[in-house]
Image (cartoon, rainbow, N blue to C red):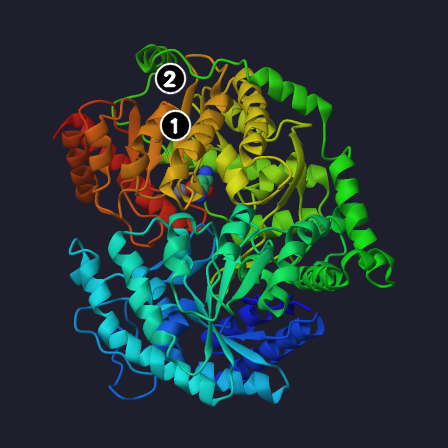
Amino acid sequence: MATLHNLGFPRIGVRRELKRALESYWAGLSTQEALEQAGRELRARHWAVQAASGAELVPVGDFAWYDHMLEWSATLGAVPVRFGQAAGAPVALDTVFRMARGSAPGGGPAAACEMTKWFDTNYHYLVPELHPGQQFRIARDTLFEQVGEAQALGHAAKPVIPGPLTWLWLGKGEAYRGAGDAGKLALLAALLPVYEEVLARLAGLGARWVQIDEPILALDLPAAWREAFAAVYERLAGAPVSILLATYFGALDDNLPVVRALPVAGLHVDLARAPEQLAAVAGGLRPGQVLSAGVIDGRNVWRADLDAWRARLAPYAATLGERLWLAPSCSLLHVPVDLSAEDQLDDELKSWLSFARQKLDELSLLARALELGEAADSVAGVADALAVQRRALRTRAESRRIHLPAVQSALREAGGLARGRPPFAQRSAAQQARLRLPAFPTTTIGSFPQTPEIRALRRDWRAGSLGDAAYEKAIRKEIADSIAFQERVGLDVLVHGEAERNDMVEYFGELLAGFAFTQNGWVQSYGSRCVKPPVLFGDIARPVPMTVGWTAYAQSLTDRPVKGMLTGPVTLLQWSFVRDDQPRSTTCRQLALALRGEALDLEAAGIGVIQIDEPALREGLPLRRAQWAGYLGWAVDSFRLCTTGVRDDTQIHTHMCYSEFNDIIESIAAMDADVITIETSRSNMELLGAFEDFRYPNDIGPGVYDIHSPNVPEVEGMVGLVRRAAARLPGGRLWVNPDCGLKTRAWPEAEAALLKMVAAARVLRQGR
Ligand code: GLN
Ligand code: ZN
């Protein structure tokens, strides 16, 4: 039978036990020993779950206190100087936490390492810091200890480590800015001996296989990096263990010839994302080489079509025999732990889903079915499980909850809707006549402080202990307070403050048809932080207006314009688990149509300014450049669909809270929002270069202060920032606004900062 294995299991625990243990330790409420114990328990439980579902090799090294890249940097002794690591001494757990968070119960504070998104996932890793002449050594023993732990529990351990090229590629350092990749690749000379030592130690512990992850093989790689693979793996192949080289998150494509030439004992490929590469990969295997087929989707929550996989894999099972391994496509880190922990989802919907535990069961069923061949459909235990699987897929395909004819015909008609509004100059004149805004108009990004009282309101209302009428009254009071506050501070375009929103996706998802919510479907985002992405399972409809009541109420309290606040279609898509039975572009257009209805309803209710947030636009970019244009095409089209049909004098804003635009500026301009507010305060206006080169034609609100910091900004600083922007942006008008929503701030900070911001706008208007 095909060998079953797993690339990695979610480390956080079904009840987020790791989160609790970490936060209690960080807060000084429990000891390091208690934390270590919690980690041991989680690892033991997770290995047991994997072994019970038939995994013959359990991953070790997928567990991390904060992040597996960080663990690996510590293991390699790559600790930046500012953390005061003593040469030769082991790297302490508190040092790992200081690298992650800047502080820990033991050891002084220091600037934390940078954190960024792991490929195209919502998981964040700590960026390795590299410097020329860097030395490496085995500086932490956790991996070896955990191998021992797994073995003591009776498991065959398969250590999992980041590959040297992926680790270097993802690293950064002063010295490498601009100098390019030669400097990074030069570090291999010092790095590889340590990898060899690690492999030798793992072999000494009795590990037969070591999984080395090189997900950069799913990226466009410069020639020097592609060439480096051969030298690196020829060298590592000399180690006394079998190496399984793991690639995931996409097709190998032009990197396939590189991979084919490597003398590794096994190769794992992602067939959920890139099923089409199966024949080419299998056809190029070296004699004796193992193919690990990543068939169960580690990035999404749907049950797999096992019949389809049986048919596709059967020829390879026949020819490869024991050399065919089965696995999820990537680590299961990116899906929730256990569907059986959900008792609020209805049975039908639940039958369509599969979380980490269930995915391993699917894998083992697939292995049994492949082994039995046609007989599988008559063997008890297998035949009925396959029938259950089939029934789930069929009811999903046929469900009337998923396929709403009205939505589909609306979408067909939308195909004929004009995308795009009259020229900006015409709109801008109409908007100015209606809104009568001063030069350098001031506004905020949407949310105001989410106080404990507001959270309690929402919680009590959800729990049913606060009735609808009382809840509505309380939220209205929050809105009235925030409108009065903004008038007092002197802002020009007001917002209602988003007190009713727990989360910018969840709020809309709960009001739209086609979304479902889990109770425990947590996925690690970074460290102890988890997100619970909604499940976008069906056609999207908007049974009721979602924001009109709150926004119109806010507008009724003031003569100044109130800005309606919507989450954009790409962001709703990007931060959910999305149905896989139709292209994402189709789902995105459905979301856009629903938002279009909302925008038109807001307009009809007298709202003259509408913001459609798209903070996730950039992170949706495919890993391969060749696919960018396709994605950006439908993403921009969806945004424009939201605004099609609004009047010329309705002003559309969008907001993106990041600062890398240079390579997608044309698409952002094509969205054609009347005003875009962006993050600039932390990047010191650097990014505005992109807007300058492109002469971004519409209005821009470069965030003038950093809302992530509790510090109150100074007037001069903000004035200077806007003046620098004005010098570089001869075209559109400039707005004055913070760089993101204020929900994480306290009221006194928000007030102090906004007063200074309004003062800065006054200085700018006077031209002093
Ligand atoms: N309107 C949202 C807010 O102010 C935007 C949040 C975001 O950019 N992520 O909170
Ligand atoms: Zn933002």
The residue drawn where x is 34% and y is 71% is: 234
Query: Percent x, y for residue 741?
Result: 41, 42
The residue pinned by badge 2 equals 435
Splitting the image into four quadrants, where does ligand 2 fall? top left
Between discs 1 and 2, the one toward the N terminus:
2
The residue drawn where x is 60% and y is 55% is: 295
192 shown above or below 420: below
Q: Which mark is residue 384?
A: none
The residue pinned by badge 1 equals 493
Query: Percent x, y for residue 50?
Result: 65, 71
Query: Looking at the image, can residue 116 be seen?
Result: no
- The secondary structure type at the circle numbered 2 is helix
Q: Quadrant of residue 609?
A: top left
- Viewed as shown, does residue 56 lie left or right of 111? right
206 shown above or below 545: below
Tell me the amino acid under the disc marked 2. Answer: Leu
Asked whether the residues under the numbered discs 1 and 2 touch, taking CB atoms below 8 Å apart as contact, a structural biologist would say: yes
Q: CA distance from mark 1 to mark 2?
A: 9 Å
